[in-house]
Every structure is written in structure tokens, then in C-alpha cells.
Amino acid sequence: MDKQNPQDSHQTECFWSLSSTEAFASLAADQKGLTSKQAVSRIKQYGHNTLKSGNKAPMLLLLLSQFKSPITIMLIIAALLSASLGDIADTVIILLIVMISSLLGFWQERGAANAVSELLKMVQLHCTVLREGEKKEISIEEIVPGDIIYLSAGDIIPGDSLLLEAQELFIDEAAFTGETYPVEKFPGVLQPDIPLAKRSNSLFMGSNVISGKAIGLIMKTGSQTEFGKISTSLQQKAPETNFERGIRKFGYMLMEITLILVIIIFAVNVFLHKPVLDSFLFSLALAVGLTPQLLPAIISVNLSTGARRMAKHQVIVKRLSSIENFGSMDILCSDKTGTITEGKVTLKDSLSIDGKHSDKVLQYAWLNASMQQGFNNPIDKAICLAYPKPESSTDPYHVQAEIPYDFIRKRLTVQVKNKKDNLVITKGALMVILNICNQTETADGSLVPLDQNRAKILDQYQQLSDAGFRTLGVAYKAGSAEKNFTRDQEQQMIFLGFITLFDPPRAGMSATLTKLKNLGVQLKIITGDNALVAKSLEQQIGIATPKILIGSTL
């Protein structure tokens, strides 16, 4: 961020040691949020909330990088030698070849960089802020110190923030601490010298919300954040590809051979009492002749041709040298959802423990999905789309309490009520749901101990998973209108049935897999779904004998 200045108050350097009142005062903000005028003024003061540089130096560096190849350097030296020998024609030809090949590479990589920038504009991240007392969706780049942000599961933290309110909040801070497990956050005041890993009241730019909800006050943005400091301290240099390494080594070899031959020939001529000047000029001419003038141009033309062919298939090549790496690939690791499959979750059915359709299971799953106020996920959307639009009711359900989904519990619980009922409904991973139940409800509505039907439930789960369906469990229990349901009470529930969902393979995936196999490329699918669903998908796309590795076998 090129306009970012140090924060005005020294206090904001240790904002985790401030109370919410002190934090608001240090930023000249209040709990109603900033006004539009204040936001514009602060963007001018602090700059946009981005780590990208606004100058044009990267393009100049991109142009200069086209001349760093040893072969290109050899050609430039050869051109200078030709000029020293008075051979202007050769000098112009060699330099022209160098310029054409270098500019061709620069033009291709510049175009790719611009195309990526345009794509990034289309997928800008947004967040919810409080401006002039109202919640608004704005681009993360427009966030400024003093903004109040609202967060829920799946959100990216847009700037270093002081936590004002939190509900079952867990944050992934692996980028800062190296810890893979989510960190629980809650409001409070801490000591100024407390280390980053223990700042439980702070949210850091670049981390993300695993579960829960929160309200935070933005204290720092852009390069002044902890993430920004890490970013600026690292050299943003792309790693050298195998192709570049090979060309570099080949260039050095040519330089060494040329130098050795020139020295040997010059020495032999002198030993044979040839005129020293003539011997020297002959050696220089030999050096020019040994230099492969057309090699850089041939490489650039071929790689550019490959980049254009890939562009016809909507693939943007940012670095020409990466094409060779792409072509030498022998193992392709791919995500499943949205890559191998359509990425559109569809509800297949709602089933009782007997494997028969159940309207009650669908209704309870819909209440859970439609009433939850946390992360809007594809599964809940699929359930809501599949449930018949309810007619206006004189006694509708309302949310009394909610325990948001998180990746530790792997379930979502809502407490809903109307004039007649008070229900606590939970849905989530089947084994997790079974672990908090002690009864099951049969098709006729009677309740029996879970142990009597556990084998039947697991058998149904096996069959559904073998068929390629993602299967969730639905459970419920009676709630109390006088008391909100809590996480500790997620036990002794009644298992109601299954929700089955599916995501079909993309059209033509089997043919694509065959092409990859013919090219000698193995496909490895990486997914968070269970092994049975993954096995079913692999069989659908033509992998006859899939090998499944799960966490315990890796």
C-alpha cells in the first residue's frame, strides 16, 4: 500500500491492550460506524487496504528479466564483439534477434499479468461494515481504520482488528503461528507485551473465520498489519522452473566451451607465431560464430505459440517458462468439488432410519437450514431449494438460539419455537450426530434406544455412501422457552433420519481422464468427503480400481 502512513496514535501499535472505549477514541471513531465522508478522508490518509504496489516498477523489472538468460547475455557480448570487429551488419542482426525474442516474451507475460488483474477485479472480496449506522457490503480494499466489521464462518479478516463481540468464535491463524488447529477468540484487555499467539482479543488480516460470529474494530490496514509486515519482508521472487534452470545451465556450458576454445585457438596461433592481432580477431570471430543467435528467438516463439493455444482453452499463462513444466507433468492433484464434479450440491432425498422417504426429516432439516444465521453454505441452500415453499402460517417458527457450525463439532444446532412447540434441531456429519443421540424415532413416531437401531443406521449409511451420496444426520430434542440451548446440552438427542446430497461429475470427465492417461498423467483426487463417496465418484469417472488414502494411512 503506497500511501499508508504510520498510525497516528502510538496506542494503536498495542491495540490489544486497549478497551473498546479507548480504541474508538484513539481512531476518532464511534459505535455508529464511520460516515462516507470520513471513509473517503481516511482512504486519502492511509491509502487503500491492499499490499500491492501502485508504481510501474514491476513492468520495468519484467522487461529487464527477459535479458537475464546466459544465452541472451552471450548474444549481447557477441554483438559487441562484432561491432569491435567492424561488422556492423552482424551486430545489427544479433541485437535485432535479441530484442525481438525478449520483447515477445515481455509482451506475452505483460498481457497475462493484465488479464489476471482484470480477473481479480471480477472476484474482489467483500465484507460487511457499519457505515453511518447501517450495515453495508464493501470491497476489502475500501476498509479503513475505524471501520466496524461483521464476521461469520468463512469470512477473511480484512485488517488487524480489536474484537468487540464474539459468539463461539474460532479463527485459523496458521499463517502467523504455524498451529493447524483453530484458535478461540473473545473480547477483553491484554498486556501490551503479550506475544501474537496469545492475543485472544485480536483478529489479524489474512486469517479467516472457521466458525462463529464476531464484531470487530479495524485498527490497522494494508502494510501496517502483521500480515503486511510479513509480506514486505519477503522477496516476491518466483521460483526458477526446471526449464529455466536447464536453459541457464546450457547457456553457462556454451559460455565455458566458447571461452575455452577461444583461449586454446588464440594460444595455438600465438605458439605458431601467427600475428597476435590477427589471432585475437580470429578468436573473437570464432566466439561470435559459436553463439547460437536464433536460440532465444526460437524458444520465445515456441513458448508464445503454446501460450496462445492455451489461451484458446481459457488458460492464462503468466510466465512463458512455466509451459514446459506444465508439459512435463506426470501427476495431477485435483480438488473434487467444482473441479471433477459440477460443484452444485443437490438434495437427493430425506430418509427415515428405515431408508424410506420422510417429510418430517425434510421439514426439520429445512428449519435447521433456513433459520441458521451463520455461514451461507451450499448444503443449506440445497435443502431450502428442495423444501416446498411453506404457505403463510398463523404460527410460524422463530429462532430462539443458535450454535453455529464449526469444524471441530461438525454440526449446526438451532433452537426454534412457535406458540405450540420449542425444538432443538441438529444436523451434521452422521457419526458426530450419532455420538450425541441416545434414542431414535421410527417411521410410526415411536422412540426406541439408539443401540437397538445403530447397526441398521450404519448399514443405511454404508449403502448411501457406496451409491455416491453425501449423507448427513438429523436429530432433535425438546427445548425450553425459558432458557436458551447451549453447546453443553448437545447430548441425549433423538436421531430422526438422513439427508442425502449429491454432486454429479462434470460432463466429459471420463473422456478427459482417458486423455490424461494416454498422455502419461496420473490423476489424484483430494477431497474432504468420506472415502466411500470418493470411491463412488472415481468409479463413475472411469477409475476401475480406485486406491483411497485417508488421514490415518497418509
Image (cartoon, grey):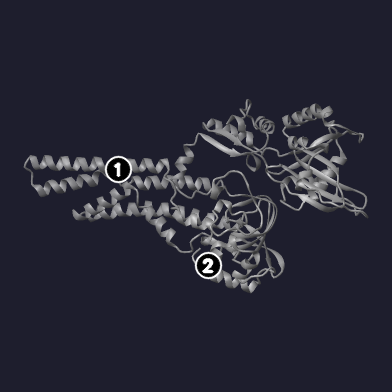
The residues bearing labels 1 and 2 have C-alpha atoms spaced at a distance of: 53 Å
User: Left or right of 472: which side holds 284?
Assistant: left
- Tag 1 secondary structure: helix
Q: Who's the residue at 71% across and 42% down the image?
A: 409
Q: Residue 24: x, y in percent?
A: 63, 68
Q: Amino acid at mark 2?
A: His
Q: Position of residue 243 (x, y in %)?
A: 41, 41
Please tell me which residue lies in front, 22 or 162: 22
Asked whether 370 or 341 is in front, the reply is 370
At x 6% / y 42%, what residue is drawn?
273
Can you see residue 47? no
Q: Amino acid at mark 1?
A: Tyr
Of residues 247 and 336, which is closer to you in this image?
Answer: 336
Which numbered circle lies on residue 10? Answer: 2
- In the rendered image, residue 274, in percent from the top left (x then y), is placed at 8, 44
Quarter in which the C terminus is drawn: top right
**Residue 478 in the figure: left or right of residue 499:** right
Left or right, 436 with respect to 299, comes to right
- What label does residue 252 carry, if any? 1
Instruction: Give the tally of numbered discs.
Output: 2
* 28 w.r.t. 250: above or below: below
Q: Seen in the image, is 385 located left or right of residue 145?
A: right
The one of 178 and 14 positioned closer to us in this rendering: 14
**Helix, strand or loop status at disc 2:** helix
Mark 2, Cα crowd under 10 Å, few <14 / some 14-19 / many 20+, is few
Q: Position of residue 470 (x, y in %)?
A: 73, 37
